[in-house]
Image (tube, rainbow, N blue to C red):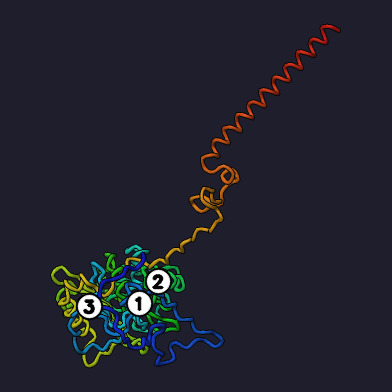
């Protein structure tokens, strides 16, 4: 769906240099080094027009006219506030700036799982799942788990072992990654490239605050995801095979913020702290995204709470005059307009072309669209006359032959 223009405050004359327009900042460790002889993936193409509206291409603060200053203590290098129902983007900072998602990418994996796998389907754990770099839930080799159990553990406690097991269930890790990236493109999340199912850093990993909001909005359409993200505690099969162990939702906002609708946090050395969550107040549902933030001096979940309070205070005026919009699908490239081919036809002459732009037939060229049928009827008449003529000649010849036989 093509992105519409929005009536909002004009783009500032002087914008800061968009340092992360193309790629996330350089890594701080060796997690994104490629194998010897291999080349790192090329950065994702930057759309000519920012997805969601022109103002979302700004990399400073993007605020509606006369909006108050955002709250203090926000450490995230990119953040975004949007209305989950209408898709209106209320305020942002560098919304399309490319950052690393860390475990926030598990929302994308969870959405693919919710779309493709039945909750009562089973997944058997393997040594490869168990060997994943943790955070881990603790799977037991050969044990079977339901998709519902694994989806809850994935979202609630960010298990990398669970992410790997679910990726295998989706046809293998490469297949799962393809499905995740295909869904991102389908949604219009064109800054996003998943390289691992868990969000562990790897060459080419990328997302943006805008994209994470798009993905979370899509995930909230699936009851299985909503149930998982809103669940505070479950009993999960113990890794030693004896009984169960509790898994508690690690999203502090779920119990600390009134009206919380769940969320997901993440951290890696390269991504730093990331968070996405939503809340409802007086019928309004907002989603907040923070990328590349710090836990000091204010916790990330407290930063999210401050931004949500700010967003609810902007409503409803900001919804009527948004700075952008969460699109309902990938923006489609405009079809090229085919210019009519110039002809030398003068006034009163018939141009050698048809209304749909195709090449005309010989009959159309000679007689036009109306003359063609007339010519066809005339040709049929001539053909019938010739048949009658030939039949008459054959009859005369037969009579002449009989006459000669009678006189001989």
Residue located 21% across and 89% down the image: 73
Label 2: element kind: helix
Whole-number angstrom distance, CA of label 1 to CA of label 2:
9 Å
Q: Which is nearer the N-term, disc 1 or disc 2?
A: 1
Residue 332 x %, y %: 40, 66
Question: Quarter of the image containing the C terminus?
Answer: top right
Position above or below: 391 against 160: above
Question: Quarter of the image containing the N terminus?
Answer: bottom left
Circle 2 packing at 10 Å, graded few (<14), some (14-19), many (20+), is many
Furthest toward the left, the residue is 282
Residue 64 disc label:
3
| Pointer 2 residue | 180
Residue 105 disc label:
1
Circle 1 packing at 10 Å, graded few (<14), some (14-19), many (20+), is many
Q: Which is nearer the N-term, disc 3 or disc 2?
A: 3
On the picture, is 88 further left or further right than 380?
left
Residue located 28% across and 70% down the image: 217
Q: Nearer the viewer, residue 200 or 145?
A: 200
Quadrant housing residue 118: bottom left
**Viewer can see residue 246:** no
Quadrant housing residue 322: bottom left
Label 1: element kind: helix
């Amino acid at each position: 769906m093509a992105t519409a223009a929005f009536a909002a405050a004009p783009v500032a004359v002087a914008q800061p240099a968009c340092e992360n327009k193309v790629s996330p900042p350089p890594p701080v460790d060796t997690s994104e080094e490629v194998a010897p002889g291999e080349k790192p993936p090329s950065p994702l193409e930057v759309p000519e027009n920012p997805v969601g509206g022109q103002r979302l291409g700004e990399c400073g603060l993007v605020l509606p006219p006369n909006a108050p200053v955002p709250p203090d203590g926000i450490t995230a290098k990119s953040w975004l506030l949007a209305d989950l129902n209408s898709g209106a983007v209320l305020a942002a900072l560098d919304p399309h700036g490319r950052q690393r998602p860390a475990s926030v990418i598990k929302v994308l994996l969870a959405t693919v799982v919710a779309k493709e796998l039945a909750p009562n389907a089973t997944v058997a754990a393997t040594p490869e799942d168990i060997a994943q770099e943790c955070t881990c839930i603790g799977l037991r080799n050969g044990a079977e788990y339901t998709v519902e159990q694994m989806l809850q553990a994935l979202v609630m406690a960010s298990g990398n072992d669970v992410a790997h097991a679910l990726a295998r269930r989706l046809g293998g890790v490469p297949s799962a990654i393809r499905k995740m990236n295909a869904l991102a493109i389908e949604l219009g999340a064109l800054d996003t490239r998943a390289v691992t199912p868990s969000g562990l850093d790897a060459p080419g990993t990328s997302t943006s605050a805008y994209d994470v909001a798009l993905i979370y909005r899509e995930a909230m359409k699936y009851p299985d995801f909503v149930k998982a993200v809103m669940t505070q505690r479950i009993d999960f099969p113990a890794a030693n095979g004896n009984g169960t162990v509790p898994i508690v939702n690690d999203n502090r906002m779920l119990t600390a913020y009134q009206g919380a609708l769940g969320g997901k946090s993440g951290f890696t050395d390269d991504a730093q702290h990331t968070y996405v969550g939503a809340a409802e107040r007086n019928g309004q549902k907002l989603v907040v995204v923070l990328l590349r933030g710090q836990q000091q001096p204010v916790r990330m979940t407290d930063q999210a709470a401050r931004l949500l309070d700010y967003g609810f205070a902007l409503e409803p005026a900001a919804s009527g005059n948004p700075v952008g919009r969460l699109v309902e699908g990938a923006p489609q490239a405009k079809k090229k307009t085919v210019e009519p081919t110039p002809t030398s036809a003068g006034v009163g002459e018939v141009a050698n072309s048809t209304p749909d732009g195709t090449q005309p037939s010989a009959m159309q060229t000679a007689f036009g669209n109306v003359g063609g049928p007339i010519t066809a009827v005339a040709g049929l008449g001539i053909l019938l006359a010739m048949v009658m003529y030939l039949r008459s000649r054959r009859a005369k010849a037969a009579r002449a032959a009989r006459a000669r036989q009678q006189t001989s």
